[in-house]
Image (spheres, grey):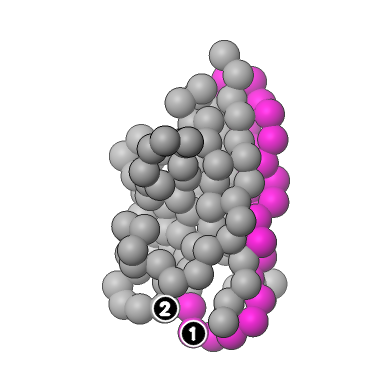
Amino acid sequence: QVELVESGGGLVQAGGSLRLSCSASGRTFIIFGMGWFRQVPGEEREFVAAIHSGSETSWYADSVKGRFTISKDAGKNEVYLQMNSLKPDDTARYYCAADRTFPVGRTRNDYDFWGQGTQVTVSS
């Protein structure tokens, strides 16, 4: 079992920045990749970014490419999402997720463990 806890959400004006953190505990050695997803009430949970646990290889949704950066600190079992140039459309609850299998997934069904999420609200 892997436990994930997100932090760092909040209210920010358009154009601003936020940094989300995800702390993993438990059987972290089984994790192949880590991802960030977001969800707005009434809509599907959508992929934002992912990173391979054993390298710096990362992937991004087109909607955030160039604005968001995923990174990790393997020694602390933490993953981060630096979000710059935020837009009102980025408003959502952001979830951290862990993937046990190859390749690192980009859909909700690829991930095995989820955090509770952290709310990000971008005002116009």
Give how far across and how far down residue 62 sits, in percent. Answer: 31, 39
The answer to whether residue 3 shows anywhere in this view is yes
Q: Quadrant of residue 79?
A: bottom right
Give how far across and how far down residue 104 sits, in percent. Answer: 34, 68
Q: Which image quarter holds the N terminus?
A: bottom right
Q: Which residue is mark 1?
A: 30
The residue drawn where x is 61% and y is 36% is 120
Q: Which mark is residue 54?
A: none
Instruction: Give the residue type at disc 2.
Output: Arg
Q: Quadrant of residue 55?
A: bottom left
Q: Are marks 1 and 2 in contact (CB under 8 Å)?
A: yes
Q: Quadrant of residue 19?
A: top right
The residue drawn where x is 53% and y is 31% is 91
Give how far across and how far down residue 38 sits, in percent. Answer: 47, 44
Q: Which residue is mark 2?
A: 100
Q: Secondary structure at mark 1?
A: helix
Give how far across and how far down residue 87 sits, in percent. Answer: 50, 24
Pick whichever, 49 or 92, lies toward us: 92
What is the C-alpha distance between the residues marked 1 and 2? 6 Å
Numbered range of the magenta stretch: 5-31
Instruction: Give the residue type at disc 1.
Output: Ile
In the figure, 34 relative to 54: above or below?
above
Q: How many marks?
A: 2
